[in-house]
Every structure is written in structure tokens, then in C-alpha cells.
Amino acid sequence: MKIAFDLRRIGNPGIGRYMKCLAESITAQAPEHEYLLILPPQGGHLVLAPNAQKLCTGLRYYSFREQVKLPRILSRHKVDLLHSPHFLLPLMRPCPAVATIHDVIYLACPEDLPSFTGRLYYRAMMNACSRTATRIVTDSEHSKDEIIRYLHADPAKIEVVYPAVDPFFESAADPAQVASMRSRFGIDRDYLLCVGIYKPRKNHARLLKAFQLLLKSGVQSQLVIAGPMGEGKPVLQRVADELGVADHVSFTGFVNDVDLRALYSGARVCVCPSFYEGFGFTVLEAMACGTPVVCSSATSLPEVAGKAALYFDPQKPEEMAVQLGRAFSDDAVRSSLIADGRRNLLRFSWSETARQTLAVYHAALQLPLPRAAYA
């Protein structure tokens, strides 16, 4: 079989990591197939797949042109199956298609996409994808339920396939890297870490309130918020000023993977306060770096973190502060969370992700499963 991956967003920090790890795992695990990797310009180095053909193209996402050009590419290369690790599919195509729908965040949380036109386009493309995809892969049981609820998709064609942690985060950073990172970002004491872009659903404002309560309880700490903040930074800085904690809060902006691993590794606690997540990669990345996790009890997060986190209601800063204090100050709790986190990671592996995804491909093409798929 010849399988094409649409990896044009592989340079994106979130979905790009999923695309990279998925393509590398599948091409390595099933070398008997042919592969076409459709990549952005100069993107050939972004994925390690020596047995795959790479096609770098300037074909833009969310354009009318891709609806015409992408099917032509698939026809020209005689592709048997397209996998789009994103919700965007060409409406007319010469072969069956598998799509990964990670979540329905902009349907469940429309305030995260302020543009009315953007919301209309998102809804239209998500509906088209859910109707026309031969099979749908999603990251969690929670996301499957949401896809059925919001898109009225056929449950029989949706498969939950857990992703895993990028191997880069499977070990803690070198102490020298942590020290260098702390110096560059002005981190001068034990710190709490929150990783993620600015969106209302990420719940940064209540995190700041919980942090204020933590400081008032006598805990000496710094809060580091890592990720692109965009228009949210002045909003959150104003909230921090009003709460009187601005001198204890650092915004790093976007960080590269080396610094991100160092941030995880050096943190006293990693906190995920979100109202809504389709999966929650940051939870597993923190566990992989040996950092205790405290997270929201909402949506998919308990499914992913399992018994390896302390939970709180994301609407209640007081509850968040209590759990942060336990993970920050109680050495027995910290040791237990770290050990439980290591065990929790055993539930997730890219080799298993690849095996299950290959089984989805065979189902999409109505082919018998290879013997290895039953292992």
C-alpha cells in the first residue's frame, strides 16, 4: 500500500510534534509500505523517515488551491490512502482518507476563536471531515464523545488511538541546561510551571488567583508561564498587577524544545489549569521529565493523567491553591506523584500508536490485518 501523510503543519509546536512522531513511528514499524510525506517548503529535515519519499510544497493550508492541487498530488503519486493528522481533507480525492480529529475545541469553546468567519470555516471543514473521512482517529475517549456530540459523526468509524510523548522529553534535562535556562529567564527560586498558549480555556487568570493564595499561605515560589501569549500577555500582566503577584510571575514566551525540557525538569510542580483539552501533552511531558503534576479535573485530563496527578475543579482557585501547595511542599506527596507519573507513562507509546493506526488504515481499505497487528 502507498500511504500519504499531509504534514504541511509539521513546523507547528503542538500538532507538528504529533505529525512528526506519528510519521516516524509508522514508517519505521511498517517498512513494507510506500510512503509519501507532503511537507512545507524546506521541511524535509523535520521528519526522520529514510524510506519515505518527501515532497516539499508551498501549498497553503486553508486555501481553495489546496482543494484542487492536493488531489492531483495524490493521483500523480498513485496514493492508496491519505492520512491527514489534522481535520482538513480535500473534499474531492482519488483515494480513501483517514483524518485525525484531535478535538472540537472551537465548537466547545467558541470564545477561543474570536473571528466569526473563522468559526464558520472551522465548523464547515470539521463537518465535512467527519462526513467524508473513511475513518477518524482521535486522541481520547473524551474527544470521541465530543466528536459524536458536536459533529454527529458515526461512532463506528471513530477509533481512539492514544498518542505518546516525544522521545526528546523521556529524560530530564542536564543540570547545566537547567541552570542556563534559569539564568536566561530570570528564575531565581523554586517555581511552578504552566505550559501552553494563551486562550481563555487555558484558565490562566484563575491560575494567577490560585498563585496569589499560595503565596499568602506562606509558600515561597515563582510562577513561570511558558508559551506564546500574544494579545493575552498584557491582559494577564494586568491581572497579576491587580492581585499583587506581578513580581513573582515570569512569561517566557515561545521556548524551543531544549529550553522546554529544562523548564519541565527544573520545575517544582507543573500545573495544567485548563477548562478544556482534547488530550493534554504537557501533562505527559512533565511526567516524563520527573516533575509532579497538578491538573484540572475537566474533559480529557483525568483520562490522560490517570492516578498520577492531583486534581482540582478549574473553576475554584482555592482548590487549585490547596493542591499546588501539597505538591510543592509535601515531600511524600511529591515522591509519590513522580513515581506514579513514570508508571502512567507506560500506558502510552508511539510503537503502540503506530500499530493501532496501521490497523485503522487496513480497515479503511478493507484489507485484512497483518499478523503483527494482533500482537
Image: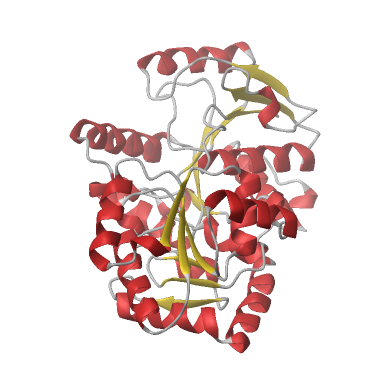
Tell me how many marks there are: 0
Picture layout, residue 258 above or below residue 119: below
Q: Is residue 330 left or right of residue 31?
A: left
Quarter of the image where one finds residue 338: bottom right
Q: Is residue 163 visible?
A: no
Q: Is residue 297 left or right of residue 185?
A: left
Q: Is residue 316 visible?
A: yes
The residue that appears at 70% across and 52% down in the rendered structure is 177
Viewer-proximal residue among 77 and 230: 230
Quarter of the image where one finds residue 115: top left
Residue 119 drawn at (x, y percent)? 24, 37
Quarter of the image where one finds residue 144: bottom left
Residue 44 drawn at (x, y percent)? 68, 23
Q: Is residue 187 left or right of residue 323?
A: right
Q: Residue furthest left?
A: 116
The residue that appears at 56% across and 87% down in the rendered structure is 330
The residue that appears at 28% across and 38% down in the rendered structure is 123
Q: Quadrant of the N terminus?
A: top right
Picture layout, residue 179 above or below residue 333: above
Residue 168 drawn at (x, y percent)? 70, 49
Residue 32 drawn at (x, y percent)? 81, 33
Viewer-proximal residue among 45 and 81: 45
The residue that appears at 78% across and 58% down in the rendered structure is 375
Picture layout, residue 84 above or below residue 36: below
